[in-house]
Image: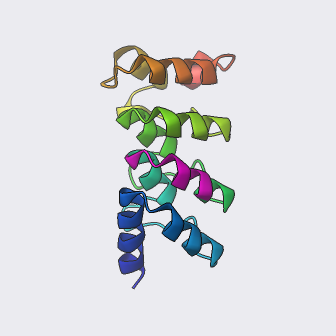
Amino acid sequence: MIDEEVDRLYRLIDKGTNHVMETYLKGGGNPNLRNRNGWTLLMVAAFKGRTEIARRLLHYGAEIDATNSVGETALALAVNKGRVRVLTLLLAHGSSTKFRPLGMPLMNYLNHGQNKSEKVRNLLREAIEGTSVDDH
């Protein structure tokens, strides 16, 4: 039953169906619902670039730094897909930059990662300014 609900919600996020997700959340739906691989609804929204759905999930208490079964956060997924608007939203809500995109330290990723988006790199550099480079 839970997998069916997760699959339905993931399809709604994929389609960008904001109003149905809002109804689900207003009705007491779990903003931290996970699938069998540990992906939360927020992770799916970040991966798909659904900024408004991510905003609503955060409003209803989605765990911003939850990790899936391979240790990815919503922020890491947004970075890897180059989802600038979602990335900006997550950073504004205090998402941690202490993650390892593609298994490498964040600073290495910024300089040599697959994502060549200068906007993504600049947003992350700004977010980690003042933190220890050793942490990343």
* Furthest-top residue in this view: 111
Could you tell me which residue is drawn at 50 percent across and 61 percent down?
A: 18
* Furthest-bottom residue in this view: 1
**Residue 105 percent across, percent down from the top left:** 45, 25
Could you tell me which residue is drawn at 40 percent across and 55 percent down?
A: 69
**Above/below status of 37 relative to 89:** below
**Residue 84 percent across, percent down from the top left:** 47, 32
> Across the whole image, how many numbered discs are drawn on residues?
0
Q: Kindly indicate the quadrant of the structure image that contains residue 113.
A: top left
Could you tell me which residue is drawn at 43 percent across and 33 percent down?
A: 79
* Furthest-front residue in this view: 19
The residue closer to the viewer here, 135 or 130, is 130
Start-end of magenta stretch: 48-56
Q: Kindly indicate the quadrant of the structure image that contains residue 30.
A: bottom right
**Residue 4 percent across, percent down from the top left:** 36, 79
The residue closer to the viewer here, 90 or 13, is 13
